[in-house]
Image (cartoon, rainbow, N blue to C red):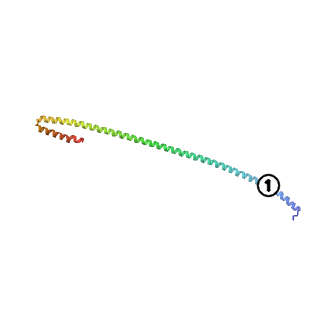
Amino acid sequence: MVNINTTMLWQLVNFFVLMFLLKRYLYSPVKEILDKRADQINSDLDQAEETREEAEELKAEYEQKLKNAHNEAQKIVDKAESRANKKAKDIINKAEDKAENLKAKKLEEIEQAKKEAAAELRDNIADYTVQAANKLIQEQLNEDKHQQMIMDFIDQLDKEKLGELQ
């Protein structure tokens, strides 16, 4: 059993004094330091959470801006392509028009050359006819000789001028 004596009473008083001193000078300051540290950690966690949320908002905002920039760039590329295609079509149309005009001009030149050649041929035939008539008058030929001379003249014309037109 337990004997209660003064020693035990003094031990009990010492124990409570020690408890009081430990609580006042050790437990309370340590608890205060730990509470401050816990508050600091909670504050840091809250701040980290706010920073994370801000970062997510910024990330979403930048992703949206990047998407808009890509869309804008695509619009610019599409617009440039359409302008280039239009310019190419214009150039092709102008080249075709120019070629058509050149072709028409050359056809007109060919037609004019044909007309000039035909006029020159008529002039030459008239000259040859006059020369043939002069020869006939000068020679006073008989009918056979006259026919032979006309045939020779026609053959000569065929060889010189009519052969070139065909």
Q: In front here: 66 or 16?
A: 66
| Residue placed furthest toward the bottom | 1
Tell me the amino acid under the disc marked 1: Tyr
**Mark 1: secondary structure:** helix
Q: Position of residue 43 (x, y in %)?
A: 70, 50
At x 55%, y 46%, the residue is 67
Furthest-right residue in view?
Answer: 5
Q: Is residue 56 left or right of residue 83?
A: right
Residues 81 and 15: in front is: 81
Q: Quadrant of the N terminus?
A: bottom right
Q: Which residue is mark 1?
A: 25
Report x, y in % for residue 5. Answer: 89, 62
Residue lying at 26% horizontally and 36% vertically, measured from the top left: 116
Q: How many marks?
A: 1
Disc 1 crowd rating (10 Å Cα; few below 14, some 14-19, many 20+) is: few
- Does 144 appear above or below 25? above
Q: Residue at x 19, y 35 (%)?
A: 127
Task: Identify the residue at horizontal 30%, vertical 38% (top origin).
Answer: 109
**Residue 68 falls in image quadrant:** top right
| Residue 108 pos. (x, y %) | 31, 37
Image side of residue 30 versus residue 154, left or right: right
Q: State left or right for residue 101 relative to residue 159.
A: right
